[in-house]
Structures are given as structure tokens and as C-alpha cells.
Image (cartoon, helix red, strand yellow):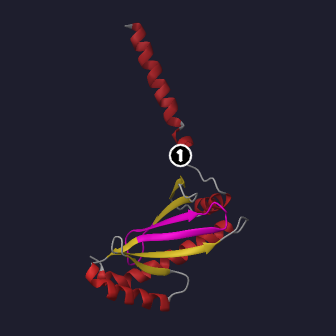
Amino acid sequence: MKTSKTLAALLLALALLLSLSVPAFAVSAQYPTTRAFVQALDEKNLTYTCGGVDSDGDERVTVEFVGEYKDNILVNLFFGQDHDLVNLRIWNLIDINEADYEKVLDACNELHASYKFVTFFVDKTDWSVTAKLDLPIREGENCGEICLDGLSYLVNIADSGYDTLKAFAK
């Protein structure tokens, strides 16, 4: 009986000890450009998730925002393995009916004429609108700030674009 109590106490202590180090098992940024961006996010106290490097060699970071027009804006950033590019994507800004394709395409074209940098397109694989920004970057002290600027452009323009596109949302 004494042995089982001792064993149980040791297992409990081990479990508590291991639970203290859980953050050490979290995915951390591997690429220098991703690390610079994550550091910039930390300085702004923004919450994010590092998804690690995918099979294409891109390192993913996800950041979520609440917009003025859209409640949930989920941005996925993909940092290239050559440390010279970050692709920012907001998938499913709206989901549309296939029958509205031409009208939504016209609305996307109007948004292109109104805004620089951000592109809106209809994804015919799932009938949704994606907002994207491809940003050339390089390693260095300004990399994180440049990525934050791109993120800000994308979120603000996509949120404004949502106000135009929401009439076509399912």
C-alpha cells in the first residue's frame, strides 16, 4: 500500500513538473524573417499562432483580428524558405453562391480599382472570396515592421472590402 501511494505521489509530481514546461514544446519560429515578425507581434502584444514549416517549405503564422465590418478576420502568413517573401492570405472573406460569380467578380474588380496592394479573387474550388497580399521582404532590423505594415494593409483593406462584398455572402 505504501509503495502504491509513493508511486502515485511520484507520478503526480512528475505530471506537475512536466506541465510547467509545456510552453517549451510549442512551435517557435525557425526562419529569421518569421522570428522578426513574431518579435514585432510580441512588442505590440498581439496574439498569434506559429504553425511551423509546411511541406512546401513555408513557415506559417496565423493572426486573428476583429474588424469594423467583419467580426472575425483570420490572416495566414507564409514566410518563404528563401527569406525574401511573405504571402498573406485571408481565406473565405465571404462564401458566395455560384450563381453570383459574375457579380462578385465585378465587385472584386471595383475593389482593385479602389485599393492598392491587396488583391481580391473568387476561389472557384469552394466559391469564396480570398484577399491576399504578397510582400517582398529581406532579413534585417526592419523586417518585422515591414511585415506588420503589410498585415495592417491587408486587414484594413479586407475589412473595408468586406463591407462591399457582404451583400453577396451566403
Provide the residue designation for mark 1.
26
Identify the residue at horizontal 38%, vertical 90% (top origin).
106
Which sits in the foreground, 160 or 170?
A: 170
Residue 94 within the segment the image draws in magenta? no
Which sits in the foreground, 170 or 127?
A: 127
Residue 39, percent from left and from top: 63, 59
Tell me if 138 is positioned left or right of 51 in this view. right
Q: Secondary structure at mark 1?
A: loop
Identify the residue at horizontal 45%, vertical 78% (top origin).
158
Q: Residues within 10 Å of mark 1 (few under 14, many from 20)?
A: few
Residue 157, percent from left and from top: 48, 81
Quadrant, the C terminus = bottom left
Tell me if 98 is positioned left or right of 148 in this view. left
Residue 143, percent from left and from top: 68, 67
Identify the residue at horizontal 53%, vertical 62% (top origin).
46
Which sits in the foreground, 19 or 49?
A: 49
Q: Which residues are magenta?
A: 65-91
Identify the residue at horizontal 51%, vertical 32% (top origin).
18
Residue 85, percent from left and from top: 63, 69
Tell me if 156 is positioned left or right of 141 in this view. left
Q: Looking at the rendering, which quadrant does residue 117 occupy?
A: bottom right
